[in-house]
Every structure is written in C-alpha cells, then in structure tokens.
C-alpha cells in the first residue's frame, strides 16, 4: 500500500501542477502560460482524489482492509513574473489521507515545498501558428520530516526532487496543443528502520529512489476568459521494483501510470480567475487507480502597472 | 539576468540533491574474521542435539607428508595464485565469517517469505505447503513464530556441528595448508586453528540441510551460496579440498539430528484447524470474556494457533504453563477500560518520536521479523568482539533458542487467553502499523525483546542496560502503534526476560565461558 501513496503523491503533483493549473495567467510548471512582468499570482486550491483498486505490480486488485483510500489536499501557490518570459513559482500543499475500511490510521500534514523557475526562450508567429517553447527547472523538498514508511497512508515520498521540463506549445486561432516532457531526479530517502526488503534485503535505513519521467499532452480551447482543455499524462519510473503479492507498498516501488483529465479555467477579470480539474488513472503499476477533482482560484496582483499585464501563451 | 536565475536554481538543486545514490550497507565493510581466542577447547562445549563426536564416522585425514595431501597442496598453490576478480569478491564477502553471513542470508530469506497469503476468490485463504513449496502461496510464510524457530534451528545446527568440528580438529590437529607450505598465497588472516575438518565447510553442510527444511523454495540460491562459501576457503588458501569434503559431510550429519528434532517438534500441527479456532472462541466466551476476532477482511484464521505446543529447545514442555503470564485484565474491568483509553490517546496524538519508534520496531510484513531485528542488533555488537566461528555460532544459538522459546510461550499465552486487540474493543483506535492477526495478550515483540535483551546482556558485557532500554522501547512501540495494551507489553517483557534468563543459565554451564 505504500506505493499507492507514493503514486498518489506523484499523481498529486501532477494534478496539482498539471491539471490544476488553476492559474489563469501564469501558471504552473507544466502548462504553457506565463505571468507578465512584475505580476504576482496567488493561487489557492483544494482537491480530493481516491481509489479502491490498485495495481500490485501488474496485478489489479482491491483491498478490503483499506476500502477507499482518499487523499484530500489544499495548496497555496505563488507565481511571480520576473519578466514576461521568466517566472518564479513556489508551492506548498497540505495533505490528509484516510482509509475507509480496516484499522490503519490516516496521516496529515504539510508536504513538499516546491520552487520552480519557468523560462520562455522562444515565442514566434509562424504563419497562422503561434509557437512557444518553455523550460522549467524545479526543486521540491519535504517541508518537515513526515512519515514515509507507512505507505500508502503516508502523505508523501519524502525525498528531494530536482526536475527539468520542456514544454512545446502551438496555438492556432483559439485552439492549442501542448506537449511536454519532464525528468525528475530524486534523492535517496531515509527510513526509520535499519533494513528493508525490495527484491533483496538491504541493510541500511537509506533507500535509493528511482528517477522518473513525466509526459503530457494537452489540447483545447484558449480564449481570453475561458481556457478548456483535455490532457493525457504519463509517469514512468526508471527503476524501482514491484509490490510483491499481498505486500505493502514501498517508497521506491516502480510507480507508473497513465491518466486522462479535463480542465477549465475561467477569468472573471484580469485579477480573478477560477479553475477546476478532474483526472482519472487509466492504467498503472504499483499505484492506485485514482479519480481526482480539484478546484481553486487565482488572484493576480499587478505590482507594476496594468498595462504590462500579459496573459500569454 | 534570466540566465543567472537559472544557474542559481540548478546550482542549488544539484548541491541539494546528490547525484550519487549508492548506499553503503551496514554489513558491507566488516573486517575479516581474526579471532582473538581460537576457543581450542570448544569440542568440549555442550551441544543441543548433536550428541557426541563418536556418533560421527569422520575419517582420519591423510598425513601432511602423504602424496595425497601434497597433491592437494600443489593444487591449492595454483588456485590461490590465479584468482579472478570475481573470486576475490567472493573471498571479501565470506571472510567476515560464515556464521555471520548465513545469519544475514537467513534474515533475507525470512523477509522475502514474510508475506501473508492472498485470499482465494471465495474469501478463504490458501495455506503454504512444505510438500509443494514452489506453488503459490510459496512455502513458507515466515511469520514471527516460524522465523523464530527457523533462526533457532539454523543457529543450533551450526553451533552443534562446529562443536563436533572443534572436537575433530583437536583430535587430528592437521595444520592449515599455509603452515605446511609457504608457497601458498593466503588472502585472509592466518590462524593456528587446526584445519581438518574445515569449519566453514561444516557450516555450509549444516546450513544446507536446515535450509532444505526451512526454505525449500530457495534451495537453488542456498546451494549457490553454500558452494561459494566452500570455494572461498580454497581460493583464500585456508583449506585443502579434503578439509572441505570432511567438513561438509560432518556438517550434514550433525544437521540431520537437528532436522530430526525439528520434524518432530509439533510445528506441522501448529496451524490448527477450524474446529480448534471455534473451540478457542467458545472457551473464551465460557470464561465470560470477549474472544479475539480477526480484524482482517476477509477474516483470516489466527496465525499458528497451536504454535504454543511446539517443543521448546531450552526447557521441557511441562515448563511452558509456568512461564505463561497471569490472566489479562478482564475486558469488562476498569483497568482494561483505562488501558484502552491510553492506547486511544497514543494513536490520536502520535508524536514524531513515537511514530519513529513504531516504524523502527514495526518488523511487520515483508521484514525479517522481531527475532531477525534482534539478530541484526546482536550482530552489530558481535562483530566488535573478534570471535571464533564456534563462538559466533554459540551466541546466535543462545539468542535464537531464547527467542524461539519466547515465541512458544508467547503463542501459548495468546491462545490460552484469546484476548482481543484494542481496535476490536474500541474501533475508534486507528493503528499506526498493521494489526497482527492473532490475539493481543501477551505482546510478541515484548516477549521476543525481553528474551533477547536478557541473553544479549549476558553475551555482550557492559551493554545490558542498553539492550534493556531497547527492549522496553520495542515493547512500548506496540502501544504507540495502537495494537497492544500496556498489560500485553509489560507481561510480555517479564515472560521474555524469564526465558532469556533460562538461556543465560544454559550459557553459564555449556562450557563456553
């Protein structure tokens, strides 16, 4: 079950950053939007996701000792336009878990603090197409030493993650497509115990965490007030191991998933927007088949003048 | 400007997230075994089941000036002077000590097999079968009682076999090959211990026989390790082939006596059956108490409900009932209500430190179990003492005999009282670790830990207080985790200590001091 959680977390990171682009103007590390120079976007969002089925390796099952494992979270995110083409973002989620059956206690607490730098080196009109390229670098680290041993109830995987993402966006009239690929380099994590079994016994409290990749395809409508899109997400863990039959999940499992979702953002005006997302896991490995929803608001504060505010792909 | 930010971010990132993910394991850099005391009199120590050396028809070795031995020496010269890197790695691994390495391997196998079987589609559970170990559920399910017994028999077989080996070593007094021929390249510390039969081959043979019984599905892996271990003695120049062959045979012969004991100890019947489970429930109700219920879904039969009838290795079965803890507080008593409240509080407000303690001592599914944890703890101390193989084996045998008998007494107690877990009486108690599928009173962790701390405190002078503190923490971890009441833990520790002290009494008289 540990895994699930981990998966969850990954998923959460996804949802949060990809699906949840609550942001209107300037957004997450995964979308193709930027905040304008000296604009600050404050976003808050909440979400819920849950699963009853999960994959133990490739074996799909349920577990009456967990029932429905649900994760509720709230997150605060800031995005500031250092320039029109360079944004800095920070985020911190609060996560709470619960199992509907069995005896296992849920956990809750602040999870990982993330910093992102989003850069748009290229933005070009090519005939009728507007093409943009983005690079995103990020660093996330646990904001406290929350428990990671009790997967899938734990609120996260506990490690530091350094990641890089490339985003390629094409817009023609009001329709756009975004393709992106990210690589997550994960630090080792430490357990509270001095030995653990993966596919062999390891006599250490330190766990080697596999790196992971994340791929996305998003497409939809991007208007002045409304952005509506559908997306596909893939997370692939490079390494890690499968949960053995009837074993507990573990932080360094091979957590893979394919998900699909929908997202909409609506801006009441230049300052205030709302966002809603849903996503569902289509297939996976050592993760729960989760369905998640999130909603949030974003509020833009123009530190400079109104004129400089830009909402751009 | 942009670039500066990007550089700063990446610089920070890389300095905070190390790219080197290699882990140095605790047991990776152990020094080569180089005992301070060779324990040359260990042939007179008291074995558990091996009887006397005259029971074993070990042939006298060829004299060192015989052509046969000279031929072995010249073969050894060739082997030791042309080592591949792979062979050197094998030497580096095993040179820390064969008893130690097999203890680690055993812990690995226990962790590998410590998985409760997945249910059938009709909600029943399949049971692993020793007769058919490779099909799911793979045999064994090495839960704590199974593991305690497995560690014990393996350690006892190695110990008994090494006592016999030391007897023959003293009797035949064949020097190590490098004492006879200076041309042999030796890659481990030299020793004055007579080399016939090879102690490492004795360990290899004894271990192989026990593993066939305990972990039959891994016999291919065990065979490979056993072969490696014997080869290491040749490659390192420590033994000639005839030392190895004799040792391997002796190890197997002695181990068969231990296997015989194990086959007749009552483990085969320990799983019980539906009629017995029902009887336990009815007996409990007849006493006016609330019987234990499985908190798993689908409900799983209690783990090894007749393990409490398995024959102990340190004392007569008739002693078991006198070691059993006094009755637990009645489920309807004020004391029990207070104990339930205490556990509820622990689980509602877990501190970081308590969560750490729960995790450190959880030793649940997929781990080497509490007995394995205490083997790991003991090992960290043993490696500092520079002991002979036979003393290593004695330490593990005493430790694991104590924990096997602790398991027997604890399981006997659990099924005698059939007391429910906190979450059964008070569903509001949500646990920080998995709820074990057997009755609460008394705590297995506490019993194991009390026994282990007592015997380790005797074997490792000066560390007694530290082991006692660890045992108390292990015991408390079960309350913090929400799966045991205080009475379970306190009484478990007391019973465990008594059993540990029986092992101490044995140690005082086994000739090893």
Image (cartoon, coloured by chain):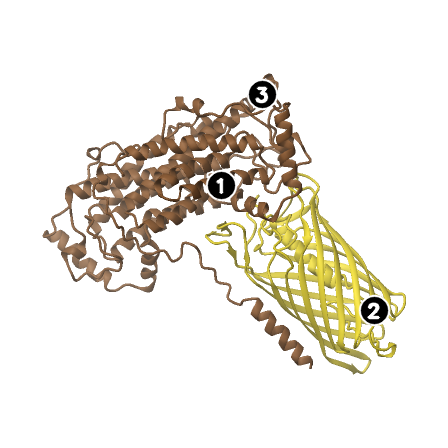
Chain colours: A yellow, B brown
1 vs 3, front mark: 3
Residue extending furthest toward the right: A268
Residue extending furthest toward the top: B286
Q: What residue does disc 1 label?
A: B138
Q: What residue does disc 2 label?
A: A300
In this image, B483 relative to B396: left or right? right
Q: Residues within 10 Å of mark 2 (few under 14, many from 20)?
A: many
Q: Earlier in the sequence, mark 1 or mark 3?
A: 1
Mark 1 on the same chain as mark 3 = yes
Tell which subunit mark 3 falls on: B
Label 2's element? strand
The label on residue A9 is none
**Disc 3 to disc 2, C-alpha distance:** 67 Å
Identify the residue at horizontal 56%, vertical 63% (top origin).
Answer: A187
Above or below, A56 against A277 in this view is: above
Tell which subunit mark 2 falls on: A
**Disc 1 to disc 2, C-alpha distance:** 60 Å
Mark 1–mark 2 CB contact (< 8 Å): no
In this image, A46 relative to B69: left or right? right
Q: What residue does disc 3 label?
A: B284
Mark 3 on the same chain as mark 2 = no
């Amino acid at each position: 079950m540990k895994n699930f959680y981990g998966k969850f977390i990954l998923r959460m990171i996804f949802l949060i950053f990809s699906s949840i682009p609550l942001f209107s103007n300037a957004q997450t590390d995964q979308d193709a939007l930027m905040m304008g120079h000296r604009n600050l976007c404050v976003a808050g969002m909440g979400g819920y996701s849950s699963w009853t089925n999960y994959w133990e390796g490739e074996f799909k099952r349920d577990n009456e000792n967990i029932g429905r494992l649900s994760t509720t979270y709230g997150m605060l995110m800031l995005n500031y336009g250092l320039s029109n083409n360079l944004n800095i973002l920070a985020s911190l989620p609060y996560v709470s878990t619960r199992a509907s059956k069995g005896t296992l206690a849920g956990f809750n607490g602040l999870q990982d603090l993330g910093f992102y730098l989003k850069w748009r080196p290229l933005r070009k009109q090519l005939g009728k197409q507007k093409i943009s390229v983005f690079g995103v670098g990020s660093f996330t680290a646990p904001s406290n030493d929350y428990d990671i041993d009790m997967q899938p109830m734990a609120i996260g995987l506990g490690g530091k993650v350094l990641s890089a993402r490339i985003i390629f966006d094409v817009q023609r009239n009001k329709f756009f497509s975004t393709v992106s690929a990210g690589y997550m380099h994960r630090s080792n994590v430490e357990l509270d115990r001095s030995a653990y079994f993966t596919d062999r016994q390891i006599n250490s409290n330190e766990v080697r965490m596999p790196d992971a990749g994340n791929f996305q395809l998003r497409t939809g409508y991007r208007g002045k007030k409304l952005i509506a899109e559908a997306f596909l997400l893939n997370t692939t863990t490079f390494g890690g191991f499968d949960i053995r039959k009837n074993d507990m999940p573990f932080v360094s499992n091979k957590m893979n998933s394919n998900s699909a979702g929908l997202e909409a953002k609506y801006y009441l005006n230049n300052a205030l927007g709302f966002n809603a997302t849903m996503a569902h896991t289509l297939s996976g490995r050592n993760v729960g088949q989760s369905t998640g929803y999130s909603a949030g608001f974003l509020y833009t504060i123009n530190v400079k003048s109104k004129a400089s505010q830009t909402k751009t792909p | 400007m942009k670039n500066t930010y990007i550089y700063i971010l990446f610089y920070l990132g890389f300095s905070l997230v190390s790219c080197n993910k290699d882990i140095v394991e605790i047991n990776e850099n152990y020094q080569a075994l180089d005992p301070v005391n060779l324990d040359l009199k260990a042939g007179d120590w008291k074995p558990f089941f091996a009887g006397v050396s005259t029971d074993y028809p070990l042939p006298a070795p060829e004299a060192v000036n015989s052509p046969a031995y000279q031929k072995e020496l010249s073969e050894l010269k060739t082997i030791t002077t042309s080592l591949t890197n792979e062979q050197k790695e094998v030497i580096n691994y095993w040179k820390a000590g064969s008893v130690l390495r097999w203890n680690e391997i055993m812990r690995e196998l226990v962790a590998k097999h410590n998985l409760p079987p997945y249910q059938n589609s009709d909600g029943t559970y399949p049971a692993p079968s020793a007769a058919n170990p490779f099909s799911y559920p793979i045999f064994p399910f090495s839960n704590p009682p199974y593991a305690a017994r497995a560690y014990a028999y393996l350690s006892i077989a190695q110990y008994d076999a090494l006592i016999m080996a030391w007897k023959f070593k003293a009797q035949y007094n064949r020097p190590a090959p490098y004492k006879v021929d200076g041309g042999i390249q030796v890659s481990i510390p030299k020793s004055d211990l007579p080399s016939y039969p090879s102690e490492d081959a004795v360990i290899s043979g004894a271990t192989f026989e026990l593993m066939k019984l305990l972990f039959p599905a891994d016999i291919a892996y065990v065979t490979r390790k056993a072969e490696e271990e014997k080869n290491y003695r040749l490659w390192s120049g420590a033994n000639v082939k005839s030392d190895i062959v004799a040792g391997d045979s002796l190890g197997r012969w002695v181990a068969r006596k231990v296997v015989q004991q194990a086959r007749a100890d009552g483990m085969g019947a320990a799983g019980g059956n539906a009629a017995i489970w029902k009887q336990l429930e009815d007996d409990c109700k007849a006493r006016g108490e609330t019987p234990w219920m499985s908190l798993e879904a689908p409900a799983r039969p209690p783990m090894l409900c007749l393990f409490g009838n398995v024959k102990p290795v340190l004392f007569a079965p008739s002693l078991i009932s006198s070691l059993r803890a006094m009755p637990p507080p009645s489920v309807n008593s004020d004391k029990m209500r207070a104990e339930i409240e205490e556990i509820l509080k622990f689980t509602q407000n877990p501190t970081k430190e308590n969560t750490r303690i729960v995790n450190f001592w959880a030793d649940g599914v997929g781990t080497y179990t509490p007995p394995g944890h205490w083997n790991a703890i003991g090992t960290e101390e043993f490696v500092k003492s520079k002991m002979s193989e036979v003393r290593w084996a004695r330490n593990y045998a005493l430790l694991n005999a104590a924990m096997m008998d602790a398991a027997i007494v604890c399981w006997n107690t659990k099924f005698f009282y059939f007391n429910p877990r906190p979450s059964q009486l008070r569903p509001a108690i949500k646990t920080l670790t998995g709820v074990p599928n057997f009755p609460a009173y008394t705590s297995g962790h506490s019993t194991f830990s009390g026994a282990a701390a007592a015997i380790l405190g005797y074997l490792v002078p000066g560390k007694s207080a530290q082991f006692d503190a660890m045992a108390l923490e292990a015991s408390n971890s079960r309350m913090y985790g929400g799966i045991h009441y205080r009475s379970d833990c306190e009484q478990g520790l007391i019973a465990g200590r008594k059993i540990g002290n029986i092992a101490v009494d044995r140690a005082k008289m086994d000739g090893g001091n």
